[in-house]
Amino acid sequence: MNSKKSAPKAASGKRQASLLGPKPRAAAGKPGENRQPQRKTGGQAREAASPESPAVPAGPAVEDQAATIIQCTFRKLLAKKELARRRQEHQEYLEQMEKLQREAFLALVRREQEAARRQREQEEAARRERQEELQRRSRMLEAAFEGDLGEIRAVLKEVEQLLTREGVGHDEAGQMRRLQRRLAMVECEDCHGNTPLSEAAAGGQPLAIQLLAELGASPNSKVASLDAVASVLQSWDLSLTETMLRNMEAEQQRRAQEAQRHKEAEAKRMILKVQQLAKEQQRCHKELQQAYCELNRRITEHDKCERRLAGKTELTLQAIKDAEAQVDRLRQEAQKAEETLAMARLELREQTQEEEEEVPGLRCQVTELHDVLMKDVGDRIRADGRWPLVIDPSGQAATFLRYQDTNYVDTVNPEHLRPERVRLALLGALRYGKPLVFDLHEVDLFPAVQQQLEAVQPGLAQELLSRALLQEERYLSLLRPADGPEYGPTQFQEARLEHFRLFFVTRVRWPPAEQLQLLLPVRVQLPSTGI
């Protein structure tokens, strides 16, 4: 009974349990433990989330520190290498300048030695000629005194042969020179003023007197007062003397006219010779310029082959060597043509009796170029108003300016003379206040520079040479839209513009007269002291 009565109660208990839900599971842990999780309050949650101390920024990682140290060390190494490179370049520059000065001085010494040798040879030849002339005069005087007509004619024949060896021809000019030399021998004098005519009179030789008179000897000479001479003179036909005097006067006038015509003809000949030599010099300069262009083309081809790894560097190097040899040969020809032209001009001045004008301008040594050109000590360049033309056959001035802070333009390089490159070189020199240098080398490329300046902008050459480009901001006309902000109109400052310079450098010893008028000559003198 009891079991039956209790059955409904059990069922009702199950229904209650189902309504209450499932029993909670025991937490993981020891068996038999039943732990309920406790909900944390907001304050407790915040305390758990935030640390007890304030946040400290994390320092660089070890890798970052190592990278910084490596970068600093690498930059120091690069800076040391750059400093060593610049010191090496400066040392090489100093050594190059010293080498150039030494070579220039040695070349000057060799030229002076060669000139001294030629001078000694000329003096020795002149001494021998004077000695031979004195001997001929002595023979002429003795033959006149002794009445030896054959010896007189022999001496005069030697004079004719000497003129032939000297290259005197038998044309009108040659005949004039022969007549002058023959007359000079007939009227020669000894240390006492005795002439062949007076010696013949003193020796009582009427035939010798007659021969000398016919040859043009002047009767107004010293005559001895011996009785024999007096008898000879008394027996002389006076009508013959008067005829001879008239003939001699007419002969002298004719000789004077011939001498004047000869002088004029010789002057014309020398003028034509100078003109021909000037054309020859221009031809040599043109060929030298073409050789320089060819050399630069060969160098460009070689650089392209190296960049493309074409494998033809041996051929391009050989082409460069051939072009360099051609440049050296033509440079020597141009120098020889220049020296020949200078000697012809000197001979022309001597014939026309014109004094050689001293070339105006400045003179300085290589060591003074910085003070003369860069600093303009004494304001001599500014006072003159013309830009300098540096004349330096040794080439040291060009080397000096190339290693300075300048915009250097190599005029024999066609790439350097492109109008756009010339414009940028001029614009940069104006913008940053530095010299613009045109190196003309041994070639007369001044007209080519003027032509390229005109290609940049019409009238630019004249404005630049006259300094008008620096006035009223006319230089701003050189700006182009693609030049960038660094060449904006506001970037050109007056203080920098005052440091702008324009230099032309040439190795030609005697530049054309046009350049000497447009530019201020600055001749670089080689040192005269020992090394």
Image: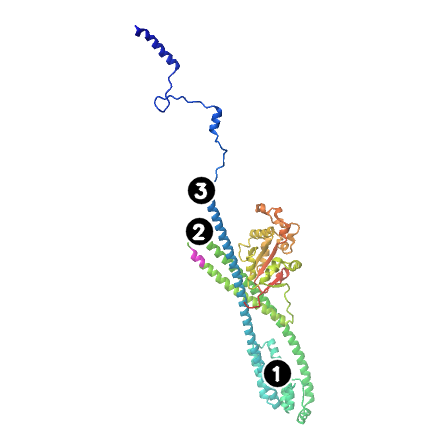
| Element assignment for label 1 | helix
Where residue 185 is drawn, which disc sits there?
Answer: 1
Above or below residue 308? Residue 216 is below
Label 1: few (<14), some or many (≥20) within 10 Å?
many
Q: Which residue is mark 2?
A: 308
Q: Earlier in the sequence, mark 2 or mark 1?
A: 1
* Amino acid beneath label 2: Arg
**Figure check: 144 above or below 458:** below
Q: Position of residue 508 (x, y in %)?
A: 57, 63
Q: Quadrant of the N terminus?
A: top left
Residue at 49% across / 61% down in the picture?
324
Quarter-of-image position of residue 232:
bottom right
Which mark is first along the chain, 2 or 3?
3
Residue at x 59%, y 66% (from the top left corner): 275
* Residue marked by disc 3: 63
Task: Tell me where the magenta segment starts and ends, as one range.
Answer: 312-317
Mark closest to the chain's N terminus, 1 or 3: 3
- Tag 3 and tag 2, C-beta contact below 8 Å: no
